[in-house]
């Protein structure tokens, strides 16, 4: 997208070992439960790992931003002067797992179905597709609504291709436990409904000899084991119920890895660095609620959140406060706006309130405390902002201009979030705000968030190195009222929309960087969420049967390129069996 691919003439990726042995089982955990194998619709709870079942037209490089190589597609036809269309040529050997060919008609069916029946975020992501045409059995053309969205071919290339024949006699928009017919490297071997799923490597996989697949998909089986409780899941890892764990709990990371298998060298604990933007996470204000529409209120509540005390006392000092929606990347806005950023911001500033303009034009920073747990200075500032917003105190309780008490209901599906939210609720109480937390099961949480039935939630927004149309799904006005939208804050801001529009059509890397930083400044200054914290890299723990290439990818863990040491696996299985 923004340069020359590095590996176009190579026979395998540098982060792959083409001589890696095949065999063994990769097992990991998932939280909650599942009742569907269709991850593309709003209904039900989809199982993890379905991407292994179906190939996409392209496969992304793991060490180059915005570079993709052919998978189902072995050629592309396009006019570099006219980006309003593109043609994908399907590999003549591409096959579904039943050995029927993957055709252009399957591609047409996939995207027509996505555009009409998939979750709102996907429909928005592919919204610039105007028409899909099968030119012949192996050739499919996409025409776009405009010439500006240069990322749309990459987005098309990422989507798993469905079989029209497979869905002929069943409804796509209904929950299903029937495995879809796919063209990918794995097929479903067994399902224990709601508890586990095992994928088996397909020995007839059509793409096993492609250069992009050399040294990849080395495990005979991939297993996801589901746990409703995260503590139980950790105990399961300790006794070898599953053998790879992406550790998200800093408490477990600091204090929990002292069991015998660690001491005996049978479990490895490691931080794998990367250069990706840290996932933006925050306590999101639901702007559909009138009480959050005043920026003074949102800023006041942000001041009440005491990260420094939380990090020291609860999070074991493991985290860094997020200061950006693109933290840990070149897309992050730092210090004062550059002249290049101001080119985009100046025309839009008059359309924003003075307080927002000030936040954009200064070196924005999330509020800080002294970490002692009192947060007095910030609470005093917050109190004044609430008074400025028209609230009044009566006997220590906060009331609005209509005499209604200020109440906030937090919604969560994860009990571990209590340690983040409950201290915040105590601080809100010091401001006279009555706040409560309700923890519900995952299906109820999904249903309520689809309907935006909450005051505040803790949410995450994964970012990429080349932000584009997915940002419209996060922050765009057009999806703010669509049930199931990823715009959980309900942002409807013409200035944000204008920056998103320009970002989608940006033609070079420099423009993408400057527009991302400009967008970052506006989102921060509007206080749409209280930024939480992040960890640079990935904390992983695994039973010592896995090996990985010496050169790791820059932007991913690269688990699909790991392999099993058969002797080590046998030793570990004996150890686990003896416990």
Image: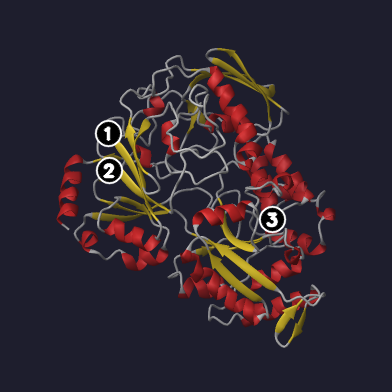
Q: Nearer the viewer, residue 451 or 529?
A: 451
Q: Earlier in the sequence, mark 1 or mark 2?
A: 1
Name of the residue lying farthest toward the bottom = 395
Say few, some or many: other residues with alpha carbon within 10 Å of mark 3 (under 14 / 14 to 19 / 20 or more): many
Viewer can see residue 63: no
Q: Quadrant of the N terminus?
A: top right
Task: Where is residue 434? Give x, y as percent.
Answer: 65, 76
- Asked whether the beta carbons under mark 1 and mark 2 sit within 8 Å of each other, the answer is yes
Give the spatial CA distance, label 3 vs label 1: 45 Å
Q: Earlier in the sequence, mark 3 or mark 2?
A: 3
The residue pinned by badge 3 equals 523
Local SS, label 3: helix
Task: Where is residue 329? Give x, y as percent.
Answer: 55, 50
Instruction: Work out whether 43 lies above or below 209.
Output: below
Residue drawn at x 28%, y 52% is: 241
The residue pinned by badge 1 equals 20
Task: Where is residue 506? Give x, y as percent.
Answer: 68, 37
The disc placed on residue 547 is: 2
Local SS, label 2: strand
Give the spatial CA distance, label 1 vs label 2: 9 Å
311 on left or right of 219? right
519 on left or right of 316? right
50 on left or right of 518? left
């Amino acid at each position: 997208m923004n340069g020359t691919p590095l590996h176009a003439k190579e026979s395998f990726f540098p982060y792959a070992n083409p001589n890696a042995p095949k065999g063994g089982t990769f097992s990991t955990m998932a939280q909650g439960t599942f009742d569907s194998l269709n991850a593309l619709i709003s209904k039900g709870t989809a199982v993890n790992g379905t991407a292994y079942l179906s190939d996409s037209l392209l496969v992304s490089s793991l060490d180059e931003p915005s570079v993709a190589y052919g998978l189902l597609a072995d050629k592309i036809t396009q006019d570099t002067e006219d980006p309003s269309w593109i043609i994908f040529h399907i590999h003549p050997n591409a096959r579904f797992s039943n050995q029927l060919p993957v055709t252009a008609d399957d591609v047409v069916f996939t995207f027509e179905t996505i555009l009409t029946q998939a979750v709102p975020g996907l429909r928005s992501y592919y919204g610039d597709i105007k028409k899909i045409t099968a030119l012949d059995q192996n050739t499919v053309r996409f025409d776009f609504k405009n010439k500006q969205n240069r990322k749309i071919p990459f987005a098309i290339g990422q989507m798993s291709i469905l079989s029209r024949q497979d869905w002929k006699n069943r409804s796509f928009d209904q929950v299903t436990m029937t495995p879809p017919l796919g063209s990918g490297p794995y097929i479903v071997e067994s399902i224990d409904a709601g508890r586990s799923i095992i994928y088996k490597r397909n020995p007839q996989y059509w793409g096993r000899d492609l250069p992009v697949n050399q040294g990849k998909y080395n495990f005979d089986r991939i297993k996801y084991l589901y746990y409703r409780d995260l503590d139980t899941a950790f105990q399961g890892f300790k006794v070898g119920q599953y053998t790879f764990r992406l550790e998200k709990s800093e408490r477990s990371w600091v204090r929990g890895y002292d069991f015998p298998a660690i001491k005996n060298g049978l479990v490895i604990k490691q931080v794998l660095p990367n250069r990706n933007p840290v996932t933006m996470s925050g306590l999101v204000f639901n702007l559909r609620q009138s009480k959050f529409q005043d920026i003074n209120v949102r800023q006041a509540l942000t001041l009440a959140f005491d990260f420094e005390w939380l990090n020291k006392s609860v999070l074991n000092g493991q985290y860094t406060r997020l200061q950006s929606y693109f933290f840990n990347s070149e897309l992050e806005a730092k210090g004062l706006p550059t002249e290049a950023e101001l080119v985009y911001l100046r025309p839009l500033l008059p359309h924003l309130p003075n307080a927002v303009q000030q936040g954009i034009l200064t070196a924005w920073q999330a509020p800080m405390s002294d970490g002692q747990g009192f947060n007095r200075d910030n609470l005093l500032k917050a109190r004044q902002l609430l008074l400025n917003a028209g609230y009044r105190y009566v006997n220590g309780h906060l009331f609005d201009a209509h005499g209604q008490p200020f109440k906030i209901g937090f919604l969560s599906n994860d009990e571990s979030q209590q340690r983040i939210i409950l201290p915040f609720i105590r601080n809100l109480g010091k401001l006279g705000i009555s706040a409560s937390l309700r923890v519900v099961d995952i299906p109820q949480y999904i249903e309520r968030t689809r309907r935006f039935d909450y005051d505040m939630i803790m949410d995450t927004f994964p970012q990429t190195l080349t932000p584009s149309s997915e940002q419209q799904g996060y922050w765009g006005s057009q999806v703010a009222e669509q049930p199931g939208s990823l715009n959980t804050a309900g942002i409807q801001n013409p200035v944000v929309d204008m920056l998103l529009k320009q970002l989608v059509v940006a033609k070079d890397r420099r423009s993408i960087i400057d527009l991302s930083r400009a967008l970052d400044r506006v989102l921060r200054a509007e206080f749409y969420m209280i930024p939480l914290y992040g960890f640079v890299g990935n904390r992983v723990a695994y039973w010592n049967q896995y090996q990985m290439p010496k050169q790791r990818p820059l932007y991913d863990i690269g688990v699909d390129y790991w392999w099993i040491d058969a002797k080590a696996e046998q030793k570990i299985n004996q150890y686990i069996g003896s416990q």
